[in-house]
Amino acid sequence: MSENSLFAILLRSHWWISVAIAGVLSLLAWVLLPEAYRIAGALSSFPFIVIAAMSAWRRRDAPSNARIEQTAQAINGMAWPAFADLLEQAFRRDGYTVRRRTGSIVDFELERKGRTMLVSAKRWKSARAGLEPLRELQAARDASEAPDALWIGLGALTDTARPFAAEHRIAVWQLAELAQALRGLPLGPTPRA
């Protein structure tokens, strides 16, 4: 399916948009078509109902806007050690073995089911991420022969960095993905005993 086709766009949109389109098309078919064709015309909007169901299913676990905003406020106020601890908790909860790394672009080395992923997250507060840090992450991945890489940052990727990440299959987590990954974890300061 083409990325810019109507159905692809609706799959990325809220489910209720597809339901609204289906309703309008059914109503128009019922009103404008001859009586013999009304039911068939009304049923012709069924693909939009299917798209609505698919869109709702894909978004079932997506964080709400309030949760995304809460996550943004919490992690913007964190220092690196607290943010790194939070990420480590999230990775461990999701079944990864976590090794922290220092001195390079790679902050975490994750392993699950025999697959290794290198994670770069220390520059999470940067307003924009350019091509150079992604190149460094890719070089580290090539050197370690890790199949997966993940860049974590709140800022937007530059126009050259986004295609580079896509071309080299570097996953990018921004605010929505972080809100999803950090679900269920306390975002505020935790008292120490």
Image (tube, helix red, strand yellow):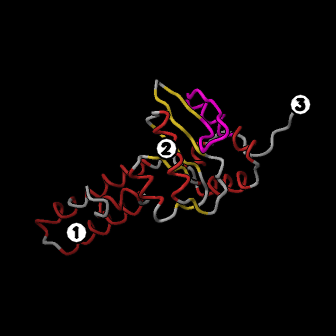
Residue at the spot of label 2: 139
Residue at 56% x, 32% y is 110
Q: Looking at this rendering, what residue extends furthest in the left direction?
A: 36
Q: Nearer the viewer, mark 1 or mark 2?
A: 2
Q: Look at label 2 and name its amino acid.
A: Ala
Q: Mark 2, residues whose alpha carbon is within 10 Å: few (<14), some, or many (≥20)?
A: few
* Image location of residue 95, percent across then percent down: 55, 28
Q: Secondary structure at mark 1?
A: helix
Q: Which residue is mark 3?
A: 193
Which residue occupies the foreground of this view, 27 or 121?
121
Please provide the residue range marked out in magenta.
86-108
Amino acid on which disc 3 is placed: Ala
Q: Is residue 34 above or below residue 99?
A: below
User: Looking at the rendering, which quadrant does residue 128 occupy?
Assistant: bottom right
Q: Which residue is denoted by mark 1 in the rendering?
A: 30
Q: Is residue 40 left or right of residue 121?
A: left
SS for callout 3: loop
Q: Are marks 1 and 3 in contact (CB under 8 Å)?
A: no
Task: Choose the circle earlier in sequence order: 3 or 2.
Answer: 2
Q: Position of residue 15 (x, y in %)?
A: 41, 57
The residue positioned 75% from the left and 50% from the top of the image is 78
Secondary structure, mark 2, is: helix
The amino acid pointed to by label 1 is: Trp
Q: Is residue 71 magenta?
A: no
Residue 25, placed above or below residue 125:
below
Whole-percent x, y for residue 130 in the image: 54, 60
Q: Residue at x 52, y 60 (%)?
A: 157
First along the sequence among labels 1 and 3 = 1
